[in-house]
Image (tube, grey):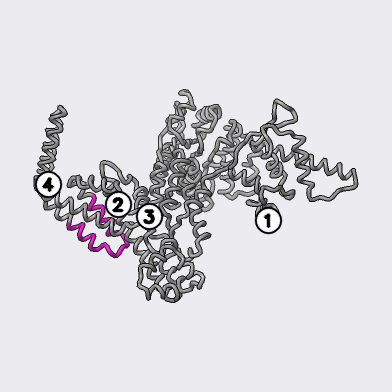
Amino acid sequence: QQIQEEMNKQLFDNLVSFLRRSHSEFQEKATEWTCRMKSREIPTAALVLGVNVTDHDLTFKSLSEILQNNITPYVASLQAKDCPGIKNLMQKLMGQLMNCYVDADSSEEEDCAQVSPNRIRCSMTSLISWYENITKKTDSETPNRKRTSSRHLQSPPVVVIFKDMESFTTKVLQDFIVISSQHIHELPLILIFGIATSPMIIHSLLPHSISSLLCIELFQSLSCKEHLSTIIDKLLLTTQFAFKLSEKVLQVLINIFLYHDFSVQNFIKGFQLCIVEHFYSQPLSVLCCELSEAKKRVNSLSHSQCENIRRLPSFRRYVESQESEKQIALLTSDNFLKEAVQKLLEDLHVYHENYLPVLRCLHVFTSSLPKYPLGKQIRELHCACLESRVWETEDYESSLQLARMLNKSDLVTMLQKCVEIFVSSSGKDFDKVVEKLKDFLAQFQKLEGACQEQGESISSQKELQKKTDLYHLQKSLLELKESRRSKKLTKFEVLRFEVVDFIDSLVKNYLVPADHQTLHELVYFSRAGALREHLNAAPRVALHTALNNPGCYLKHQALRSDGGSLSNKAPDVCIVYKLHLECGRLINLVDWLEAFATVVTAAEGPSGDAAVSDQVDDVIHARFIRAVSELELLGFIKASKQKTDHVARLTWGGC
């Protein structure tokens, strides 16, 4: 929430400035406002938020709070589903505004009765009368009981937010705009259109005669991709939190974001689900906390928890790399194991402190290249480093080759950024790295022949461009290649190679994949399959499982089916579903009912009373009809036109 507030701060500040500017004349003098609004234009902010609709609610909630705190207490938020007609829109609008006033003013019961929406006709005239009474009452109040905050405008405007403008019907919008424009000199109204697609939707929904009544100013929020990158950068790529995501899990969340909904809120929910799943399924997740707290908890580990540590694959690799005496101590002595675990947890913490600055430094180089073999975003580079040894990949080699062709100004800029990253990092091993980078910068400043060398290369390239014949072009390229081989490297080229090699050495030392670290299982959640099952819905499989084996979801032992057997204790729709699986394309309802009655009455004894038997048959018949209706609602069957006493089956094959 803090990150989102920081990202939206500029947008909200611009909106607040727009509202203040729109009503500056109205604050000074009403006549000036009337003169200004002769054209009956309504100040309108077109707020383009993007297609990530699920994130809009939080944005509008924050926007409403800011407007109520700084501009006006009269803010109403409308949704298309609540406003099918102009009457519903006015009722919703007046209800929100009047309730807002009553809550803010804490008026007495008689005041509440005066502004009750049930006693006031929902019309623009009633709204104007209410606004005039409210403003007069505010002006006549004493300073001690002044309802309007000093931060509010003296004649606060009425702000109406249309959260989902695309979903509103054209007639409702047109009627409201026309009515509002006719009374704009009496009611200072400002509209805010929440747009998910494009600002052109305003002209698509509204004809020119209506849109000309709006004085529209466009506001663009950050794209959802930029929002996600910031979230990952400040939430995941930090040492502030011990919990981490593996490469596969992070890739699942990113793929769902990119290919499903572009929703940052859903990404955060997926991240929360990873936290819950990790602490629920990992017995040793008690050590996933701050380093000082984790060391304290290590001392209180039980023998069973120590055995769980010994079973971890990373710890077994660590034991195999030790001497035989230490191996025996690690596998037999709990106290010795706890001391080793404390040291390993500290090493894991140091690994993260060193990993992140080097990752950011490498991203400075890769994101400045003309091509992006390792990706432009830092999340792509992070995934590549978690997946394998990044320096062994072809993309990394391509990046190094491109980096060895950078000019002096680009290299100097990158080195300066890297120095800032390492200076601000919490890693303790980067003092020598900073000194080395500053030494490179000093050497670049002393170079004078780099510009001449660069000019020679440019002139040679111009000569190549003049040769349009393919044969001569190939010949010139071969000659240039041979000359470069025989030519001695300049000081700039030597220094450029040294810089790239130094960055390469940092990558090989500090960007080792996390799964190579001992005890990484304690802090890294890697169950991508479990996460995919939770987030990637498979409705048909879930529906088949629920109907075919209801005990799987109801957690009732008597409902668990063995070998496809039918239990009369199962829900009626489950019994009907299993029976329908044994039928062909057309199902005879009479035979189906008899089979259903046989299963339901299987565990019941014979009844001697005929009247009671008829009553039971009626109940079973009613239960069968209801179950078949539910199955039809779920889409498994439909009525058949061929035979009136049959239904057609719609689904085939297993799940």
Q: CA distance from mark 1 to mark 4?
A: 80 Å
Query: What's the mark number on residue 392?
Result: 2
**Quadrant in the rendering for residue 330:** bottom left
N-term mark: 2 or 4: 2
Whether residues under marks 1 and 4 lie with C-beta atoms below 8 angstroms apart, the answer is no
Residue found at x 74% / y 39%: 626
Q: Nearer the viewer, mark 2 or mark 4?
A: 2
Front position in the image: 88 or 131: 88
Q: CA distance from mark 1 to mark 2?
A: 53 Å
Magenta region includes residue 629: no
Three-letter code for the amino acid on which mark 1 is drawn: Gln
Magenta region includes residue 438: yes
Q: CA distance from mark 3 to mark 4?
A: 37 Å
N-term mark: 3 or 2: 3
Q: Is residue 484 left or right of residue 184?
A: left
Q: Nearer the viewer, mark 1 or mark 4?
A: 1
Name the residue beneath numbered marker 4: 450
The residues colored magenta run 414-439
N-term mark: 1 or 2: 2
**Most common secondary structure along the magenta stretch:** helix
Residue found at x 66% / y 49%: 563
Three-letter code for the amino acid on which mark 3 is drawn: Leu
- What is the total number of numbered labels drawn onto the structure image? 4
